[in-house]
Amino acid sequence: MANPASIPVIDISESQGDQVHTAKQLVDAAAQHGFVYIRNTGQYISPANVEQAFSVSKVLFESPFEDKQRCKIEKNNQGWVGMHTESLDPKTQRETLKSFNFGAFTESKATQPIPKSMEPYEADLATFRESCHNLCRRLLLLFGIGLEVDPPDFFAEAHSPDKASGSILRFLYYPPPRATPTAQESDVRAGAHSDYGSVTLLFRLKGQAGLEILTPTKDWVPVPVCPPGTEKDPSPPILVNIGDLLSYWTNGLLRSTVHRVTFADSETSKNAHTAGLTNGESTKDPRYSIVYFCHPADDTRLTAVPSERVQSFQGGLATANAGNPYAERKVLTADEHLKMRLQATYLEMYGSEEREQKSQAKMKQFARVSIFNSVLNKAYASTGLSRNLGLTIIPPSIHTMAKERAVVKEPARERKETSGDKVTKKGKSKKHTETRYDTADDKSRGGVSVNLQPVEDTSMVDSLDLEDAKSSVNKKSKIKTKSKEDEQHEVEDDKGATQGGAMFFSIGTNDAKKETESQNDEQDEVEAEKEISQGYVEFFSIDTNPTPVDLAAVRVAGAENSTGPKLNREARREIRLIEKQREIFIKKMEKQLGEDSVDEALLQKQMDKWIRKRDLMTRDRHQRKELRARQSAAARRQKKFTQKQEKQEKIKSLRTQLSKMDEL
Ligand SMILES: O=C(O)CCC(=O)C(=O)O
Ligand SMILES: [Fe+2]
């Protein structure tokens, strides 16, 4: 068993004597280990506040999945990260963590969507984040003093809280090993990585093992929560580690050290002997941790700081970061660095180059399908939007179907009206007219209707077959139907999760038309599923920020008399609303800045923001609708079940009576 790391514990409270001495101690620890414990005396963050932050974190992770999913992580690195979404170390197969990243707060209000369950704690979160930042700035000042940077507050100033930065307060949750039954030996809780910012604060709970650091001799050693001498402190020390930026800034004098979180537990890992457990700590329970990643202002340049000690440092970045593949200097500013690291972490969200190429190929394929092109062209043309719209992927079977349909020139859909009497639930007769747009004859392969709706999951668009895609939708709906949301379901759902905020089209086929309520049990099931999935199979999306398309060409194509299917009412309404909103923004801009002063880029930004917000609202509405459908389906099922039981009871009692009569 590897010995725990001998990271020093330092008391930085101002009352603790010589500031220069403390600063030198800090620099030495950061240069040797890249990690240092700060005794928590409560001067910067009280143990009570840390405890409260952990309680809030538990509330967050226990809140409904939909509530968190609504706030999925975006490219600004803020939001909810579901299971297997993140990949800190692309070499590791899977990481079993969930987390929530809080960005900036203004006047105690979050500047990002947060789960409803967090609303009562917004001010507490803002205060906690602020105290973390203050502690980091104190540490940065001490690093400046210890390194004799001129001026000593060089680092602290670069982290002014008034400027936009990538700083993040992050709550982490690692499910217990028993909740990840499909875990493989190679799985880790968090993959090997160094942190992206300047300094990181890490809060952990007593008894929760797992964190390990990679030493210069390439050994993984555990970092206990309570190192010797701190066991009786009111709160475990705060673990501070040096991030890549401080390493760049100091030419590698301060080390950004690679670390990870493992299942290093004798019960769960065959590698227990290499992992090494520290006394009294284990990984068998769920693990919670809180991290504060402190970043400088976005535009901060990452050149070596004005310090003789740094400039004359012989080791240099390469030597100091031997074993840290992440610390290669490739960038000039803090936000460029962060973007580069986030791209590698959230492959799914940013899309790898390979996926980009594939989607390009699919786009070309898509372009050949005139029937769908005409739908899009019309949509683009009628919105008159200057935002760049683009598309992603259609399953080949739909592609084939569309091609066929284009070739046979299926007859246009006809408006059909049927009227008659309908018996209401109360047994009264009522006049009823139903309008349908239907194909005129039975040559139809199922009419196509296009429907605009935001969806939260596009995983099925990769499906190779329409039927597959359909059953995948239904399967997912079924998963969601289960009332008890357990870990495994979250894992399933997370797998397909992609970034929100995009607007998607979906396609419905004739067989998905609303059916009249049936008395038949099975039919009821089918109906419920249809209601839930709304009978639609997502097939392509309009991304709000994708590959640009030539809008001029789109307008020309849109103006032609296309023979493709018409946009349905919801789609047309959506487009009208977008147009209207755009006009409102233009008018506002003109009012403020005078006529012909429309700033296209700004307008674009406003539109994107508005659309994102609207998409979220629409998604909420759909979720509510889905919930209602689920509830009524469950009620129907329950009713059927009770009726069946009553019937059986009756038969049973009749049989008993009969046999009694027989006996007589
Ligand atoms: O949970 C932990 O102990 C460490 C997490 C971590 O290293 C990170 O989020 O960067
Ligand atoms: Fe980390």
Image (cartoon, grey):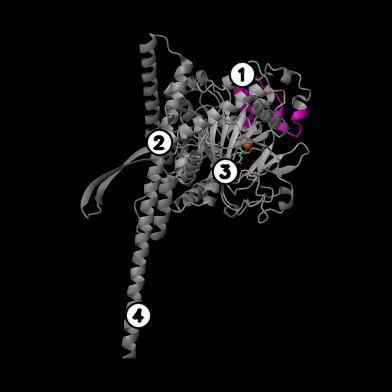
Instruction: Report the Cα–Cα distance between label 4 and label 1.
Output: 91 Å
Task: Classify the position of ligand 2 by quadrant: top left, top right, bottom left or bottom right.
Answer: top right
Looking at the image, is 409 positioned above or below residue 442?
A: above
Expressed as whole percent of the image width and height from the top left, the position of residue 503 reads: 47, 32
Per the image, is 315 magenta? no
Residue 598 drawn above or below residue 643: above
Label 3 sits on residue: 233
Question: What distance separates the C-alpha of mark 2 from that of mark 1?
Answer: 47 Å
| Label 3 to label 4: alpha-carbon separation | 74 Å
Question: Is label 4 within 8 A of ligand 1 (CB to nearest ligand atom)?
Answer: no
Q: Which residue is mark 4?
A: 655
Mark 4 Cα-neighbour bin, 10 Å: few <14, some 14–19, many ≥20: few
Reply above or below: 219 against 355.
Answer: below
SS of the residue at dot 2? helix
Q: Which residue is mark 1?
A: 154
Magenta-tinted stretch:
319-343
